[in-house]
Amino acid sequence: MRSLTLRSPAKVNLYLQVLGKRPDGYHNLKTIFERIDLCDEIRLTPNLDGAIRISCSHPQVPLGPKNLVYRIAALLKKEHKISAGVNIHITKHIPVAAGLAGGSSNAATVLLGLNRLWNLSLNRKKLWEYGQAIGSDVPFFLYDTSWALGEGRGDKITPLSLKAKLWHILIVPRVKMYSREVFTRLNLQLTKKWDDVNILIRSLTKNDIKMTEKLLFNDLESSILEICPRLLTVKERLTQNLNRKVIFSGSGPAVYGLTASKQEAQHVKRILEKRYSQVFVVRTL
Ligand code: C5P
């Protein structure tokens, strides 16, 4: 039976401003998403017994309803009364619960894949509705874009047609950080109320790395460091070795900086991988 193999990329946030808490418990954000070339691979194979079966190369990834991929497949199967089942194999390269949205990207990839495999003909609006029901970070990955502005709880996406291709050095400490906990600890009084996001978009348009670097920002940093104070050492070590500004991506603990070239990123990687096991050189995808 025909199977589909798809690439499922990670993201980083160049900018993440928390605007306030909403009545539904989520937070309104203004964020810039960047798709990066650190990818999982997902293979969808139809089966006739009707089951949704997940397998994964990473032993810690849940294989049942806790997995966003399982949830989206179950939702589509129920809503569209699909009798066939699907075997979903995930080859994991994106670190789990790291602020890189690997699970959300996997769910978006499966949503797009099952739309094809089950001939659902879902339009963009319907795909968005299913995606946001699974998680705030899922909608970004439904758009074929490297860059986007995220608003609402991060689910309202405006694709940005920017040509910028950036290199990054990324460290992912082996600490699992859950968005819910990071947002819960947020002290909203501490957040800055200015809005640099438009200047950041302009600096990306001009491919001005120096200005882009200056505007990197994440409102969640103090909560991330409160949950895991030793991440400050990781951040400081990367800052010292890179001699540039460094920030956490999303709700962390992944921490990264921009570099002017692949060589610069690789040079810092060679130094830091002696101490950290998950150091990546990644580029805009
Ligand atoms: O949408 P998602 O399931 O990824 O969110 C996980 C948790 O992160 C939510 O339950 C919520 O506590 C928090 N969150 C938030 N505001 C957002 C996104 C996530 O408070 N914009």
Image (cartoon, helix red, strand yellow):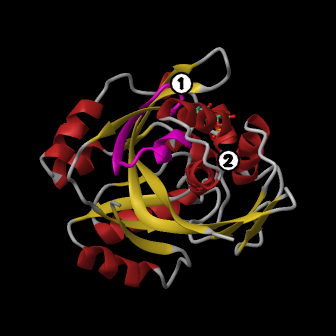
Which residue is label 1 attached to?
188
Question: Quick check: 170 left or right of 95?
Answer: left
Which residue is pictured at 67% across the width and 39% down the height? 134
Q: Quadrant of residue 86 in the image?
A: bottom right
Could you tell me which quadrant the C terminus lies in?
A: bottom left
Find numbered disc 1 in the image and state the secondary structure of the residue it sits on: helix
Which residue is pictured at 79% across the width and 60% down the height? 62
Which residue is pictured at 56% across the width and 32% down the height? 126
Query: Mark 1 belongs to which amino acid?
Result: Leu
Query: Mark 2 belongs to which amino acid?
Result: Tyr
Q: Quadrant of ligand 1?
A: top right
Q: Nearer the viewer, residue 6 or 189?
A: 6
Q: Is mark 2 within 8 Å of ligand 1?
A: yes
Query: On residue 28, which mark appears?
Result: none
Could you tell me which quadrant the N terminus lies in?
A: bottom right
Which residue is pictured at 60% across the width and 17% down the height? 22
Q: Start and end of the magenta stretch?
A: 137-155
Mark 1 burial class by Cα count in 10 Å: few <14, some 14-19, many 20+: some
Percent x, y of residue 231: 56, 58
Q: Is residue 150 magenta?
A: yes
Q: Is residue 255 above or below residue 21?
A: below
Query: On residue 178, which mark appears?
Result: 2
Q: Quadrant of residue 84 in the image?
A: bottom right
